[in-house]
Amino acid sequence: MIKRTEKDQEIVFGIHPIIELLKAKKRKLYKIYTTKPFPKSWEQISKILPKYVEIQIASKDTLNNFAGTTDHQNVVALASPFQIRKKFFEPQREKFLLMLDAIQDPRNLGAILRSAYCTGVQGVIITQKDSSPITPTVLKSSAGLAEYLEIFMAPSAKFAIQELKKAKYEIYLATIEKSQNVLQTEFKLPLCIVIGNEGTGISKNILDYGKHITLPQQNSEISYNASVAAGILLFTISTQNKLI
């Protein structure tokens, strides 16, 4: 049985999450567990693995129990905690922000963070209430790219939106009804695009704080998956402002 030796150690699993953690150099990897024979992609990790990292061999069943999933690709590690940004963003420095209002599915969250990295998002705001935290599943779903992002955790959507207003960010809310077509919208930096909960959308108490935009779709009764919508919106904003 594998046990964590320190309270401040977090599990990271999967080839890409561990590789990107090592490349990002924002936190420390303490120990890595894998199987023998080594998994096919082990060489990608081993060639950048610091010498101080302890390598232990474990059975696949042991890794399943430790990670709480079979989706670990036979590599599970212990690392220092994921770094959450403490200072709010500044429009002079971080011009392209993404706010996620109560995204609950860790795979959705991870997929959105992956898109955020790919489209040049400079800061991400997640809400503490009713949201998925940054879990090993989130990191795996982001292909490890969340390691490079500046992520701020707000106590509530209302707090975050008020801070954005105070800092004079342009705010765009992704909604369905009474919204302007995203293809007809001029996105002005510095800005923040807000994506709401998978089921209920953006919190009602912040709906009056920004410009409503929507993605065209075939049937108004059906909406895009939150991570798909986020990817399309981020790509649209990024290309319009020549950020990628």
Image (cartoon, grey):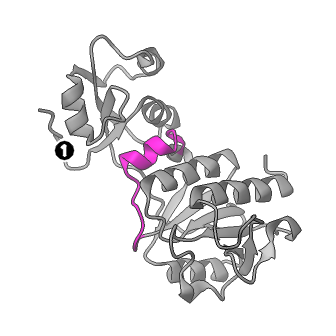
Callout 1 secondary element: loop
- Place of residue 83 in the rendered image (x, y in percent of width and height, measured from the top left): 43, 52
Q: Is residue 241 visible?
A: no
* Most foreground residue, 121 or 39: 39
Question: Which residue sits at x=64%, y=83%?
Answer: 166
Q: Residues within 10 Å of mark 1 (few under 14, many from 20)?
A: few
- Image quadrant assignment for residue 177: bottom right
Q: Is residue 153 magenta?
A: no
> Going 68% across and 76% down the picture, which residue do you hit?
176
According to the picture, the residue beneath numbered tag 1 turns out to be 6
The dominant secondary structure in magenta is loop
User: Which amino acid lies under the numbered mark 1 shown in the image of this protein?
Assistant: Glu
Residue 108 picture location, percent across and down = 50, 55
Image-based side of 57 in relation to 94, left or right: left
Quadrant in which the N terminus appears: top left
Q: Between residues 219 and 67, which one lies in front from this camera angle?
A: 219
Looking at this view, name the residue that lies furthest to the top. Answer: 37
* Left or right of 25, for residue 89: right
Labels in figure, total = 1
* The one of 162 and 1 positioned closer to us in this rendering: 1
Q: Residue 18 falls in which quadrant of the image?
A: top left
Residue 211 in view (yes/no): yes
Task: Tell me if residue 135 is in the magenta stretch.
Answer: yes
Q: Position of residue 114 (x, y in %)?
A: 58, 46
The span picked out in magenta is 128-145
Up-down relation of residue 180 to residue 121 (above or below): below
